[in-house]
Amino acid sequence: MKDSKKGLSKRQTIVLVLVIVAMAAILWWTIDWTLNEVRMDSWNMISATEKSLRDLYSNSTQTELKKWLPSNHMNFTDGLIWESKLLNFTHDRPKYENVIQVLNNGKGACGEFVWVFGAFCVANDIPLELSA
């Protein structure tokens, strides 16, 4: 009678090891590729955010923004009320290049509300610090 508990042959063991190594390599490559994509997306988003925040301090943005603001100096609470009258929340909005486009369109989601309020703060000498 033959022993039914016979192990894998040498050939089967080699094939099994090669399959495991190949699967591990594919998994590693997929994870590495995905992480690189996430890193690049994050870096691009950070760069775009930095550019848009620097733009808030530019003379052209501040000059255009003055047209949207009342002549009197406003405080933090006034700014929230001012912004709520200008913007409507929606996910259906175009991709904006600057805060003035947001104001002209009057539509935005979370990021646009932050952007407009940041512009308000800069225009009214209210300290602005954003973190993500």
Image (cartoon, rainbow, N blue to C red):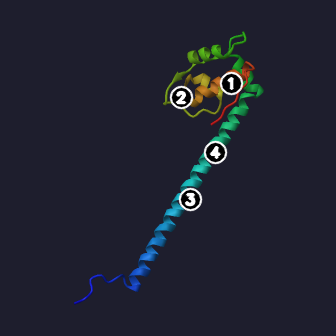
Q: Are marks 1 and 3 in contact (CB under 8 Å)?
A: no
Label 1 sits on residue: 119
Q: Nearer the viewer, mark 3 or mark 2?
A: 3
Is the residue marked by circle 2 packed among few (<14), some (14-19), or many (20+) residues within 10 Å?
A: some
Q: Based on the displayed image, in which of its 4 quarters is residue 63 positioned?
A: top right
Q: Give the CA separation, mark 2 to mark 4.
A: 20 Å
Which residue is found at the position 40% from the left and 84% from the top? 11
Which residue is found at the position 63% from the left and 33% from the top? 97
Q: Are marks 4 and 3 in contact (CB under 8 Å)?
A: no
Label 3 sits on residue: 32
Q: Quadrant of the C terminus?
A: top right
Q: Nearer the viewer, mark 1 or mark 3?
A: 3
Which residue is found at the position 72% from the left and 9% from the top? 72
Label 4 sits on residue: 44
The kind of residue tagged 3 is: Asp
- The x, y position of residue 93, in whole percent, is 52, 30
Q: Secondary structure at mark 1?
A: helix
Q: Are marks 2 and 4 in contact (CB under 8 Å)?
A: no
Which residue is found at the position 69% from the left and 14% from the top? 75
Q: Give the CA separation, mark 3 to mark 2.
A: 32 Å
Q: Based on the displayed image, in which of its 4 quarters is residue 87 positioned?
A: top right
Tag 2 or tag 3, which sits nearer the N-term?
3
Tag 1 or tag 4, which sits nearer the N-term?
4
Which of the pair 131/62 is nearer the observer? 131
The kind of residue tagged 4 is: Asn
- Side of 15 where 119 appears, left or right: right
Tag 4 or tag 2, which sits nearer the N-term?
4
Which of the pair 50/104 is nearer the observer? 50
